[in-house]
Amino acid sequence: MKQYLVLLMSILQISLFSETTLFEWKEESLNPFDELVVSWNAQRPIVGEYAISVSVKCNEWSEELPYAVWGADGQCTFTSIAKNAPVRTNEDTIELLQGAKATGFKVKVEARNGASLEHLRWLHATHVDSALFKEKVILDESWKGQESVVIPVKGRSQMALSHPRNMSICSPTSTSAVVSYLKGEDYPAVDFAAKVWDAGFDIYGNWIFAAAESSSFLGKQYNCYVTRFDSFEVIYANLKRGLPSVVSVRGELTGAIHPYTSGHLIAVIGYDAERDRILCMDPGYASDNETHVAYDRLEFLRACARRGYIAYCFDIGN
């Protein structure tokens, strides 16, 4: 797994002076990959929107494909297949098809209809070779954290919310609980859900929109991004710094309210070293005061593996 980020502060100072509405980021000569996820940190435009597009380098550069539109009046992602290369955008991801691999990517952010790049702070990209990534992630039977840690994220149940699709809003419920804790200011889950609803797919669980809205709410103090983690040490290191994560699980978890047969997003808020359990705020329970639960670490990581170890991570901003 490789991750890249580009800081935009100095570039944006130039773009403000020249009134530029376009930013492009290119990386080449990378290890071969077949999946790319791009996150951005910005204040949501007051007017207009950002249009994010991508292309990847196989033997040659693919045509530019629409990835996401994020703006004052909503957001959407796309499914779009390149005509000149085996690559497509598909909701949160850029995917290589037919066994193809890419060794480079280009991301373009265009401010349209009155939007400005002034508040675009940075971009983050995670790319993986899915076959090698799955082989790399080994569940160490003997690993235990050096000490217990718990972060006091308040319980938040999606089932207790007054929302017509509360069964489908685990991502905004978990993420709004985390960002409310980090900022010390409540962001109601229903309001967060409205800000991450993907009009292109009619879903509330779009990964990149969860990161973008988190960044818009938290501001420069935090960086928010989507990644695929390759060990619990990554999550544990963040916990030690007081930083929860939101991860996706699938399948059975002993003690869970029911099997999560499709993707379910849970906030990881601590680790119990004595019992080797991961402490979670699981929004699937019926009431807020039931959502603080502890899952066996290995069983939990196997549930994460079924979803490719996807996570929303938070870091201290620059």
Image (cartoon, rainbow, N blue to C red):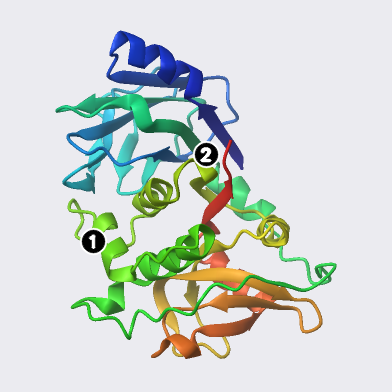
For the residue marked with disc 1, what is the amino acid?
Answer: Ala
Q: Circle 2 is placed at which residue position?
A: 127
Which is nearer the eye, 41 or 26?
A: 41
Residue 127 on image: x %, y %: 52, 39
Left or right: 291 with respect to 240?
Answer: left
Residue 160 on image: x %, y %: 32, 86
- Residue 138: image quadrant is bottom right
- Element carrying mark 1: helix
Q: The N terminus is located in which quarter?
A: top right
Q: Residue at x 48, y 29 (%)?
A: 102
For the residue marked with disc 2, what is the amino acid?
Answer: His
- Element carrying mark 2: strand
Residue 254 tag number: none
Q: Residue at x 41, y 20 (%)?
A: 12
Residue 194 tag number: 1
Identify the mark nearer the N-term, 2 or 1.
2
**Would you say the residues marked 2 and 1 are in contact, meaning their CB atoms lie under 8 Å apart?**
no
Please say if 19 is above or below 148. above
Residue furthest top in the image: 18
Residue 204 seen: no
Mark 2 is surrounded, within 10 Å at the Cα level, by few (under 14), some (14 to 19) or many (20 or more) other residues, namely many
Mark 1 is surrounded, within 10 Å at the Cα level, by few (under 14), some (14 to 19) or many (20 or more) other residues, namely few
Which is nearer the eye, 209 or 298?
A: 209
- Residue 210: image quadrant is bottom left
